Image (spheres, coloured by chain):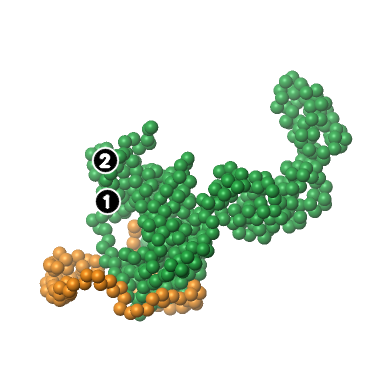
Amino acid sequence: MSHPLGEYELVIGLETHVQLKTATKLFCGCATRFGAEPNSQVCPICTGMPGMLPVLNRHAYELGVRAALALHCEIAPFTKFDRKNYFYPDLPKSYQISQFDVPISKNGWLEAAGEGHTVRVRIHRAHLEEDAGKLLHPESPVGRADYSLVDFNRSGVPLLEIVTEPDLTTPADAHAYLTELKQVLQYTGISDCDMEKGSLRCDANVSVRLRGATVLGTKTEIKNLNSFKFIVKALEHESERQIRVLEGGGRVVQETRLWDPVVGETRVMRSKEEAHDYRSFPDPDLQPFVITAEEVERIRRTLPEMPAARRRRFVESSGLTERDAEILTADRAIADYFEACAALHAAPKLLANWVIGELRKEMNERHLEAESLAEKLPPARLVELARLVEDGKITRLVGKDVLAEVLTSGAAAGRIVADKGLAQIADAGALEPLVDKVIAANGKTVADYRAGKKPALAALIGQVMRETKGKANAPLVTKLLQDRLGA
Amino acid sequence: MQVDSALVHHVADLARLGLTPEDQERYIAEMGRILGYVEKLNELNVDGVEPLVHPFDARNVFRSDEVRPCPDREEALANAPDRSEMFFRVPKVIE
């Protein structure tokens, strides 16, 4: 078997930061609303004023535990917070409150659907920490200004850092893991994982080694990976770069590299020689936290069915294809909607076609959020429409228009069909004059068909359908045309 | 622990302190005395003793996830050495 990396193999570990879905920050009551005016959601605590006292947000802690349980982690019965010390202008206290030696959870795993195989990744740990502020580097008319600006709205926003073991071996597997992680976190209501808003960020640790080697190669850390696409590209680029270094007789230097999406390369950000000495120690402002096994179980019971289990169930008990199940479960609200519809209808596959096909298209065009779908189109409405098509009351083509009309007007499909006269025409007597008209008007196509060009028939069927605005029963039209033209 | 000029220099560097040669000499002596004093603790047998992470016994001091009004931005910016409109302003930092 040939490998894209030749005799080398790639070893990847990912550190993902997700913003927890809370109303307030980790240690103070400031709002976490995205897009607020600069420095409008700040207080003495999150700007590190002397004498401030942080108090942990209970909801953030529970979301952290919930995420850890969804990732099959062990929950620490005793946990604490530490100060990670470094100087940077986005860090007002000159330390970040994080968790050093006793994180809220460790030793979990996640299974993701890779390309033709299951990707199993061990989770090393998941811990809570606060975000830093945001730095801006304004441009002046003569290039970069000689100052930077700081907005502390993000400072103190609750993050969960999820660290994997170095179990990933291809960029595609890394992508599969992140896709699954994102789905799980969205399903469980832990984070909205919106990369554009910075609520999911990823750093990658990458090394290469000769295939079969037992010792890990020297790793580099890549930062600034703000889309899944960039992560794949950066991993590809970085592994190739390291192999080139080794092949050229050099050594990989342990360093932090930054992905530059414009150039499509990673470049050095800082080397280990300048690495930080964080001098972590327990934060005396925060007393430790304990959780009982009963409380852990209480939180575990609130977990919904995970996307992987749901996919499996859709395939096994609803008879959907893997692909259909994947699309339907990608968004929990869509999956919930589909299930609400399927509960009213015996043929899930037919409903899946509606949801995956026409409905998703309409949602895109109308910028309709999955969360508000059930309100806009109650499941019973979609099921009614599907039945009209299945029972032959309307054609599938007309059904698409009716769906759009149901969404626009909110009226029932049956009402729209009656009011607009959209019922299917399956009466030969009504269709024959139209068939004759189309044959008379399309001499050349008719001749082609008679000369043996069978596809010409489709064009004639299309003409009849147009004449009836899609209402004609297609099999009947086909039969009438074939009879007239002598099949 | 041996306190020498390299260690003092490293610690000063981490704390962003500029030391004069005289400061440095003084800190070598002072830090050496302080650490020597603390090292006395190593004489104790602490087998089986859990490390103390906090001197008080309180556990699970939480607040609820309720938004509290933030002080006025002007108040937050009032303490800044430098500002620019709605932002804190700092010397240029480029990664």
Left or right: where A470 falls relative to A102: right
Q: Is residue A461 above or below residue A407?
A: above
Question: From where the camera sits, is residue A47 visible?
Answer: no
Mark 2 element type = helix
Mark 1 element type = loop
Q: Using the image, tell me which numbered label, if any, was put on residue A254.
A: 1
Q: Give the number of callouts.
A: 2
For disc 1, the chain is: A
Question: From where the camera sits, is residue A426 visible?
Answer: yes
At which x and y percent is residue A466?
Answer: 77, 38
Q: Is residue B43 above or below residue A472?
A: below
At which x and y percent is residue A465?
Answer: 77, 37
Q: Residue at x 37, y 48 (%)?
A: A167
For badge 1, the amino acid type reads: Gln
Q: Are marks 1 and 2 on the same chain?
A: yes
Q: Residue at x 12, y 74 (%)?
A: B29
Q: CA distance from mark 1 to mark 2?
A: 13 Å
Q: Which chain is green?
A: A
For disc 2, the chain is: A
Q: Using the image, tell me which numbered label, if any, was put on residue A246.
A: 2
Colour assigned to chain B in the rendering is orange
Locate the N terminus of chain B by quadrant: bottom left
